[in-house]
């Protein structure tokens, strides 16, 4: 079964209405990612801002030390003034020459020393391979240990039942054994595994069932192509038995590769329950299903038109056929033809009426099929032709007379109003043929050549015959003209061959009754399909379902357990369903045949065809748990909890699983279906090997050069014509190759992309940005470990002591808030929002704020303050690592294992550690409000300093012989109420520390004190305002103009954003994650507007004062 195999459009072209533009990253996330992508290897956003090792040797100065430095600077200033009066000055400092960039250290190849399956040997963090985050190093050894310890097997109670919390089971959408996994598989695996790990950490009995699909058509066609290219042989040269042996060997090779990649991606599968659709038990399930449904009359034999692929020489279901839209005459590449073939043309020619001089002109898009015509149809009320109804036309190339019939199906306005009828090669003509009892003449061989019914064209390839027929019509004077004709050309979505309607006796399944049951369980809510667009598509398809053609003319797959009864002395027709029996074994089938034909001497011949791959895939959720046997797994874990898959196989697979499960088990197969988006390339095109845009997730995890990417194309199975296109795309998309990002960064980025909206535009830069986020986590943890020390013993619990500082109360509240929100987001399947929550908590709140704030306390605080700060630091980090584990399993395990455990905590692995949950005791809105105000002030200071870059010639500066130039910047924070004033006064050191190194002092003003003048203004809230002194440092006129221009843009942005938020369908149709982003944009626009207005007021006042 193909994951994300198709969306029923042509690879390289835009998708239909289900898909939209790739989801946009939030402004904050985008800025953080792109910003971090430009920074140094340690991933610091601002030196010293994440507590990394970079500045560990730099002591945070106390207020006393800063006062001493200011006294020295004041003394130096007086000395300089004295020297200036004497007319002397120190010599100018010579211009520094740029230091050459330090060479990047080239590390030797990393070799993991941990024996396979043993717990990882953790090396010191100052080891050459552990100084910075290296995915290969961090991600090694853990998976084998997880698997050996059985962490991925469902934990049951003593009585063998699931835990009290319940169970959570996901069966993997089994990847095809046709080759390497792609990013669509990586996306599905990341989403599924994040839910499995999350539930496991919350105490559920979890089961993630692994397995592969035999993928009949795909696998056989790949092996046949290789056979032809390498040996110049067809499957018929080898024979069925030998070809199947070759495919089993191929399966063994690629099955192992697939499992290796799934493990690299971190999927926490229970490998003891691995399944394959052609395993013994799954094969028994297929046989049981076919026989049972045949006995009940759902499966029947019929000679009908099928979608025939001449290239693969097999029938296909409608779902395996893509419709290529043409607007008019178009030349298309068709497999097996050296020149392009003409489509999108209506060809007009005439038939002579038998026994008269009249002619009847018809029009067709497939001139070659006229060789199978047995009639001409006209509308019974079309006065042009009523006199011809009942007469016959003479075929010019074969000895055949064509009946002229009247039928309401004919549109008098289309073409000439007369339609050639080829009952054996057109679905509409087939119906007309049945109504008028016409002859059904097949003119095609299985390989697409014409047969003896085509007369002189016998043996000619069908599209060569198209041109030859036109030539012969011209010679006979029967050709009239051609016209452009918009049309759809049916293409096999495997071989891209043009599909031919062809009469074949096949096995079919009656679907209407089963489809109605499948509709009912979704309408009632027993099965929930997300997003709503997928649910609507599900309804639309099932409401218009047709019977399912089950037969495939292949050798690889489940051979149909049906036997043709040959009765001695009689010549039976294989089309006759009465002469067929089914059986779970041949012995059972023989007993049925004897009972059906008593007294007859019979022999059985098994149907050589195999079943459609989706037949076995449709049994996957329950056959993998042991059905048709009554197993413990079936009792404990069925129905399964969730199916996560691509929306493009909703009809192929999901609907059929629901139908089969209801019919065979009486239960739904799963309670929820989540359809993820399709992964597209950076240009929004569907991934296709022929375009060269299919990216191997291993290449993202390990990194790969452009040359190696090109080499992989050469070693692949591409047609030489496609190689040039594929190589060109790679050179454009990956000019520097793909950097190594690791499994965690790949997982996190794919989950972050999943908004439940449009498809995903693959971008390596974003993934590499998340690699740097992983480094941020790594360096922050190193800092914390360094600060708490080797002898640190955490407190028994994370609960507060009541002695925490404002910053500690704030970070614990934020941890609690994040835990609550991430649990809700995952419950609601808001995947993108869940990653944004943990990203913001770790990056913005823990690293950039609390770790920075804790430095001064740990350095200069009392012993009690230091201990409290370290306890909170430990709790905040421990919570962050467990919270982020479902998304970043390897990194979180590596770092969690380095943290000291709380007393009596014997949890062996983060995989089964308790997931953070909301705790009312940690809720502290008072601390949040107070500290957020302080953070708003520091943000304002930073923003103003960035906005008004001071002219070096105008600022008040002091020169030090031992330090770089320092600008004396006056910053004021004025509170509007007493409580805010007191809070800011108490936390002035925190404000100054978080504001950055450029700020010499921060003065807190009460509401009663005069408002500072000559300042730029930033208003973080209604309770405080920040003032940055700019008087004498900027050009007032220029700043007023700039501020007015920016104010205008801010007003426009706010107006535009308000329209978005106030739209009638905003809350109903937009996801919570997107709503949050859009509202934040509005808040930012309004705040920006207010700041510019207040700054303009200050500048206008300065302007007046200067006059």
Image: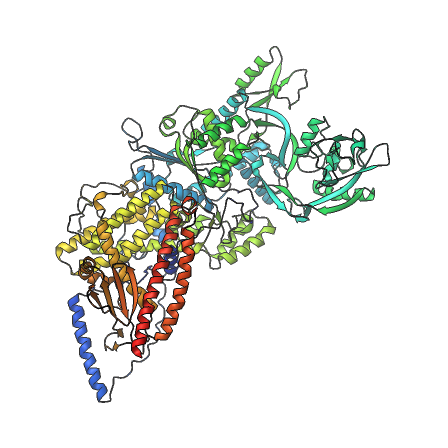
Establish if 281 lies above or below 600: below
Q: Is residue 760 left or right of residue 610?
A: left
Closer-to-camera residue (759/265)? 759
Establish if 855 lies above or below 910: below
- In the picture, residue 1096 is in which quadrant? bottom left
- In the picture, residue 426 is in which quadrant? top right
One can see residue 113 in this view = no
Residue 572 at x, y = what percent?
Answer: 66, 20
Residue 223 at x, y = what percent?
Answer: 56, 40
- Name the residue: 26% across, 50% down: 814
Residue 510 at x, y = what percent?
Answer: 55, 26
Marker count (numbered): 0
Q: Is residue 829 left or right of residue 785?
A: right
Looking at the image, which residue sits at the far left?
Answer: 863
Looking at the image, which residue sits at the far bottom?
Answer: 86
Residue 1079 at x, y = what percent?
Answer: 37, 52
Q: Is residue 236 left or right of residue 743?
A: right
Establish if 430 lies above or below 705: above
Closer-to-camera residue (33/836)? 836
- Name the residue: 21% across, 53% down: 808
Q: Is residue 566 left or right of residue 129?
A: right
């Amino acid at each position: 079964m193909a994951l994300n195999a198709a969306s029923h459009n042509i690879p390289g072209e835009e998708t239909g209405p289900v898909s939209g533009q790739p989801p946009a990253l939030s402004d904050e996330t985008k800025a953080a990612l792109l910003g971090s992508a430009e920074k140094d290897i340690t991933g610091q956003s601002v030196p010293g801002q994440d507590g990394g090792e970079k500045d560990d040797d730099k002591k945070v100065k106390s207020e006393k030390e800063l006062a001493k430095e200011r006294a020295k600077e004041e003394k130096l200033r007086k000395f300089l003034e004295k020297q200036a009066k004497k007319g002397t000055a120190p010599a100018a400092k010579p211009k520094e020459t740029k230091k050459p960039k330090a060479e990047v250290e080239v590390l030797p190849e990393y070799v993991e020393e941990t024996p396979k399956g043993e717990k990882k040997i953790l090396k010191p963090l100052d080891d050459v391979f552990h100084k910075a985050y290296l995915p290969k190093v961090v991600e090694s050894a853990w998976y084998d240990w997880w698997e050996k310890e059985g962490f991925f097997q469902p934990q049951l109670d003593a009585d063998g039942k699931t835990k009290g919390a319940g169970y959570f089971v996901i069966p993997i959408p089994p990847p095809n054994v046709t080759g390497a996994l792609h990013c669509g598989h990586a996306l599905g695996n990341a989403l599924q595994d994040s839910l499995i790990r999350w539930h496991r950490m919350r105490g559920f009995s979890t089961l993630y069932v692994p397995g592969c699909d035999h993928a009949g058509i795909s696998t056989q066609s790949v092996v046949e192509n290789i056979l032809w290219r390498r040996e110049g042989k067809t499957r018929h040269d080898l024979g069925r038995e030998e070809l199947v042996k070759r495919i089993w060997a191929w399966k063994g090779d690629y099955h192992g590769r697939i499992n290796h990649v799934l493990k690299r991606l971190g999927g926490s599968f229970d490998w003891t329950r691995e399944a394959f659709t052609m395993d013994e038990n799954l094969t028994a399930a297929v046989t049981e299903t076919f026989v049972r449904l045949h006995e009940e009359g759902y499966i029947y034999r019929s000679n009908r038109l099928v979608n025939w692929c001449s290239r693969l020489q097999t029938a296909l279901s409608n779902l395996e056929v893509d419709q290529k839209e043409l607007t008019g005459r178009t030349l298309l590449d068709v497999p097996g033809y050296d020149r392009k073939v003409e489509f999108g043309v209506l060809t007009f020619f005439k038939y002579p009426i038998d026994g008269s001089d009249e002619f009847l002109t018809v029009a067709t898009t497939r001139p070659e099929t006229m060789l199978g015509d047995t009639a001409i149809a006209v509308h019974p009320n079309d006065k042009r032709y009523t006199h011809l109804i009942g007469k016959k036309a003479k075929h010019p190339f074969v000895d055949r007379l064509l009946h002229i019939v009247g039928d309401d199906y004919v549109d008098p306005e289309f073409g000439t109003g007369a339609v050639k009828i080829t009952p054996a090669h057109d679905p509409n003509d087939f119906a007309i043929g049945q109504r008028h009892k016409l002859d059904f003449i097949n003119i095609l061989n299985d390989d697409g050549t014409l047969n003896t019914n085509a007369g002189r064209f016998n043996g000619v390839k069908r599209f060569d015959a198209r041109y030859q027929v036109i030539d012969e019509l011209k010679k006979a004077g029967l050709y009239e003209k051609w016209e452009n004709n918009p049309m759809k050309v049916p293409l096999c979505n495997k071989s891209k061959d043009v599909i031919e309607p062809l009469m074949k006796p096949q096995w079919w399944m009656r679907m209407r009754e089963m489809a109605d049951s499948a509709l009912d369980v979704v309408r009632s809510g027993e099965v929930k399909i997300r997003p709503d667009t997928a649910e609507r598509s599900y309804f639309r398809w099932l409401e218009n379902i047709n019977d399912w053609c089950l037969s495939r003319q292949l050798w690889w797959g489940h051979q149909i357990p049906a036997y043709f009864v040959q009765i001695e002395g009689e010549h039976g027709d294989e089309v006759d369903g009465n002469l067929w029996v089914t059986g779970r074994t041949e012995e059972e089938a023989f007993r049925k045949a004897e009972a059906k034909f008593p007294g007859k001497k019979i022999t059985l011949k098994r149907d050589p065809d195999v079943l459609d791959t989706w037949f076995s895939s449709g049994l996957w959720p329950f056959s993998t748990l042991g059905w048709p046997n009554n197993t413990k797994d079936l009792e404990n874990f069925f129905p399964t909890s969730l199916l996560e898959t691509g929306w493009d196989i909703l009809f192929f697979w999901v609907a059929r699983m629901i139908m089969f499960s209801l019919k065979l088990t009486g239960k739904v197969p799963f309670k929820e279906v989540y359809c993820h988006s399709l992964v597209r390339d950076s240009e929004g095109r569907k991934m296709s090997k022929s375009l060269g845009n299919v990216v191997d997730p291993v290449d993202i995890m390990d990194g790969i050069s452009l040359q190696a990417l090109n080499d992989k194309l050469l070693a692949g199975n591409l047609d030489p014509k496609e190689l040039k296109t594929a190589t060109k795309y790679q050179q454009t998309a990956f000019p520097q190759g793909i950097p190594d990002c690791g499994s965690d960064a790949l997982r996190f980025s794919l989950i972050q992309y999943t908004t439940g909206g449009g498809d995903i535009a693959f971008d390596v830069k974003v993934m590499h940005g998340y690699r740097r986020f992983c480094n941020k986590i790594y360096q922050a943890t190193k800092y914390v470990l360094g600060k708490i020390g080797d002898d640190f013993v955490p407190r028994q619990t994370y609960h507060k002591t009541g002695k925490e500082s404002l910053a500690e109360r704030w970070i614990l509240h934020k941890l609690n808030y994040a835990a609550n929100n991430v649990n809700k987001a995952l419950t609601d399947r808001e995947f993108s929002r869940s990653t944004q929550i943990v990203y913001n908590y770790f990056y913005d709140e823990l690293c950039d704020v609390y770790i920075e704030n804790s430095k001064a306390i740990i350095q200069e605080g009392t012993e009690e303050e230091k201990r409290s700060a370290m306890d909170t630091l430990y709790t905040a980090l421990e919570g962050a690592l467990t919270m982020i584990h479902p998304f970043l399993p390897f990194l979180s395990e590596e770092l969690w294992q380095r943290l000291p455990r709380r007393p009596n905590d014997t949890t062996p692995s983060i995989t089964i550690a308790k997931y953070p949950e909301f705790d009312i005791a940690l809720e502290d809105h008072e601390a949040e409000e107070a500290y957020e105000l302080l953070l708003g002030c520091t943000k304002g200071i930073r923003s103003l300093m960035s906005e008004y870059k001071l002219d070096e010639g105008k600022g008040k500066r002091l020169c030090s012989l031992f330090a770089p130039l320092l600008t004396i910047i006056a910053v004021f924070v004025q509170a509007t109420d007493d409580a805010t004033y007191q809070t800011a006064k108490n936390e002035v050191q925190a404000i100054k520390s978080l504001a950055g190194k450029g700020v010499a002092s921060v003065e807190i003003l009460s509401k009663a004190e005069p408002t500072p003048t000559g300042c730029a203004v930033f208003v973080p809230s209604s309770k405080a305002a920040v003032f940055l002194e700019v008087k004498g440092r900027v050009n007032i006129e220029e700043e007023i103009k700039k501020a007015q221009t920016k104010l205008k843009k801010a007003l426009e942005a706010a107006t535009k954003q308000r329209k978005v938020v106030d739209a009638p369908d905003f809350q109903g149709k937009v996801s919570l994650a997107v709503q949050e982003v859009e509202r934040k944009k509005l808040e930012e626009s309004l705040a920006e507007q207010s700041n510019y207005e207040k700054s303009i007021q200050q500048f206008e006042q300065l302007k007046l004062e200067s006059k």
